[in-house]
Image: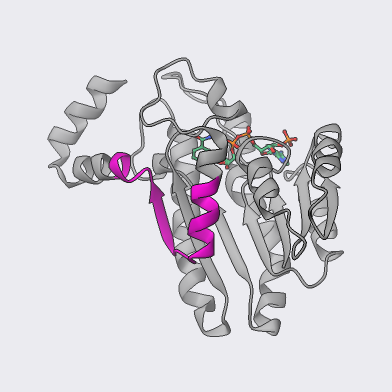
Amino acid sequence: MKILITGASSGIGEALARLYATKENELILLARREDRLLQIKSELQNAKNVEIFTVDVCEFDELREKIKSLDNIDMVILNAGMSLGHSLEITPFEDFKKLYDINFISNHAILEVLLPRFKAQKSGKIVFISSLASLISMPTSVAYSSSKRAMNAYAEGIRYKYKKYGIKVINILPGFIKSEMTDKNSFKMPFLLDTDKGAKIIYDAIGKEKRFYPFPFRFYLIIRFLNLLPQFLRDKIVNSLK
Ligand SMILES: NC(=O)c1ccc[n+]([C@@H]2O[C@H](COP(=O)([O-])OP(=O)(O)OC[C@H]3O[C@@H](n4cnc5c(N)ncnc54)[C@H](OP(=O)(O)O)[C@@H]3O)[C@@H](O)[C@H]2O)c1
């Protein structure tokens, strides 16, 4: 398989790259930090081939040109993402826009190129790395939660739209996984998974072509339960958590 992984220079993306580094797979690893990508590439000796793409996904024109230069992609893992931490202050517009550009809009820049190709070849897997945070919007992470909820809606729509062309759309919604992103959190993260364990769960869910895969399951059940409560009660509980 030829697999493009965005956000492959650390955390979940890097751990997924290690899992997919087998003699059957060609990997294209995309992120901004070239030194990290080169280091990871040098360690992935088992892969059939590893190419690195050093690009900021917010540079949409450059991003699209890089994606256009690729051929015969079988799977894309849309993993690049950021968070702004947790704050009750209003998010400055520029930060909000940057987060949306990275977490959401850049995926469309990539898929605008790849979807017609997948459609023509009548195959292709698109993996979104959303978040359990998309299912409940905490007052301290409005931008992040809403960007991931937008991703869910997008993933759902293209899944319906492209099913008849043999395109598989897989939406993964992890809870907390140890990474550079979560290392910045100062609060106790419930059900925190280590990076390799979290990535392996994602890898297995992709292998099983799960359309919508929230985990850890107990954390997901708690959120589902909260979402079933009457709004006034949910408001009370969520506000008591902030
Ligand atoms: N960790 C969690 O608990 C958790 C839970 C749910 C969902 N997620 C999602 O999982 C994904 C990976 O996050 P992570 O936890 O593994 O965090 P991470 O270690 O900070 O990884 C983020 C990756 O995204 C890349 N990236 C960020 N901004 C970019 C940009 N402008 N252009 C290109 N690449 C960019 C980073 O590479 P460079 O800095 O080198 O560009 C890095 O490789 C994110 O989408 C995140 O929202 C994480």
Residue 241 image point, x, y percent: 27, 22
Left or right: 66 as drawn, with respect to 148: right
The magenta span reads 200-220
Left or right: 139 as drawn, with respect to 206: left
Question: Which residue shows up at 66% across the image and 71% down it?
Answer: 115
Above-or-below relation of 36 to 18? above
Left or right: 95 as drawn, with respect to 109: left
Quadrant including the C terminus: top left
Of residues 191 and 158, which is closer to you in this image? 191
Q: Tell me the quarter of the picture where residue 175 sits.
A: top left
Task: Assign ligand 1 to one image quadrant.
Answer: top right
Of residues 141 and 173, which is closer to you in this image? 173
Question: Which residue shows up at 57% across the image and 83% down it?
Answer: 165
Residue 20 image point, x, y percent: 68, 55
Question: Which residue shows up at 33% across the image and 40% down it?
Answer: 136
Q: Is residue 129 visible to us here?
A: no
Residue 76 image point, x, y percent: 66, 60
Of residues 190 and 120, which is closer to you in this image? 190
Q: Tell me the quarter of the picture where residue 210 sits.
A: bottom left
